Amino acid sequence: MTRVAVVGGHGKTGRAVTAALPDAIPLGRADWDDLPGALAGCDTAYLIAPNLHPDEPTYVGDALAALTAAGVERVVYHSVASPYVPAMPHHVGKAVSEDLVRRSGLAWTILQPGAYLQNLDLSGPVVRVPYDVDAPFGFLDLADLGAAAARVLLEDGHAGATYELASRQATVRRLAGEAGFAAEKVADPRTHPWLSAMFDYYDEHGLPVGTLTLQALLA
Ligand SMILES: NC(=O)c1ccc[n+]([C@@H]2O[C@H](COP(=O)([O-])OP(=O)(O)OC[C@H]3O[C@@H](n4cnc5c(N)ncnc54)[C@H](OP(=O)(O)O)[C@@H]3O)[C@@H](O)[C@H]2O)c1
């Protein structure tokens, strides 16, 4: 049976992946004291970097070295849709990390998720986000992420593949409207410069992602 470690497994992403697998082992910050030891007995890993990690390539490179030392054979790396966007530094960190994963010597698969549907507070009466509510997105439901990750981790045939993942294409105004609510752009309450850069990019371009890859994976 495939034994999967989920590195960075305690956040919302890791919980969605772990919940979709029968026997996954979520690993957190403390496991980095001896990551090869924590990976013992696992043949596959799902690799997630913490949100806005200041140096994702180093985190990913260190994780890949630990996977190799532990004898893990397969890795699925959790990247992002449109990783090479120079205006968004944390996306570029994932683009560089994708290259490390492809050159790791492990059997690799890369998932490129769109913005999570669960990032939006759809409880109404007004859905507020810090970017243009009419910008186009491919949103990913975290339940679909779990289902797709389980397919990729537990089935053969996905080594060497890079899949973009979105559950549906929509604007925030459309999603709000479907729930009977209005939508409005508000000032960004956070000050992290990478988030501000991301919202500026979203204002101009959104983050469109196709939905057909996910449909094919889950068919
Ligand atoms: N939000 C979105 O729409 C979206 C879309 C696409 C991709 N992503 C990507 O998804 C990834 C995960 O985001 P998330 O918000 O689910 O995760 P998160 O909550 O930021 O990550 C939590 C995990 O990372 C571990 N961790 C935190 N700091 C660490 C450190 N310095 N060294 C080692 N491990 C550390 C935590 O361990 P402990 O629990 O032990 O502290 C926990 O297991 C990010 O890379 C993000 O860019 C997000």
Image (spheres, grey):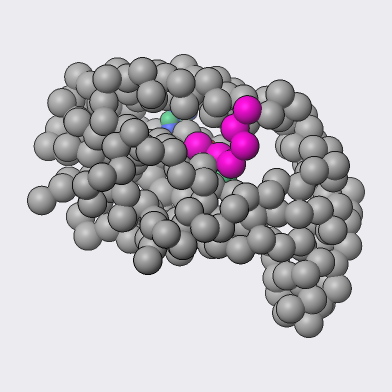
Relative to 95, does residue 15 appear above or below in the rendering? below
Q: Residue at x 71, y 24 (%)?
A: 86
Quadrant in the picture for the C terminus = bottom left
| 90 is within the stretch colored magenta | no
Residue 141 position, x and y percent, is 54, 62
For the image, the number of numbered tags is 0
The quarter of the displayed image where residue 125 is located: bottom right
Residue placed most toward the observer, 136 or 43: 136
Q: Magenta region, mostly helix, strand or loop?
A: loop
User: Can the viewer see residue 194?
Assistant: yes
> Looking at the picture, how far across and down is residue 160, in whole percent?
34, 33
Left or right of 79? Residue 170 is right
Is 137 displayed left or right of 95 in the figure?
right
Give the residues drawn in magenta, as a range.
78-84
- At a point 54% along the width and 28% down the height, the residue shown is 94
For the point 15% across and 26% down, which residue is it?
Answer: 71
Q: Is residue 131 left or right of residue 155?
A: right
Q: Can the viewer see residue 11 in this picture?
A: no
Residue 19 location in percent, x, y? 34, 60
Classify 20 as above or below 65.
Answer: below
Residue at the bottom extreme, as displayed: 180
Residue drawn at x 31%, y 55% as measured from the top left: 150
Image height check: is 50 above or below 104?
A: below
| Vertical placement of residue 62 versus 5, above or below | above
Q: Nearer the viewer, residue 148 or 42?
A: 148
**Residue 55 position in % (x across, y down):** 55, 20
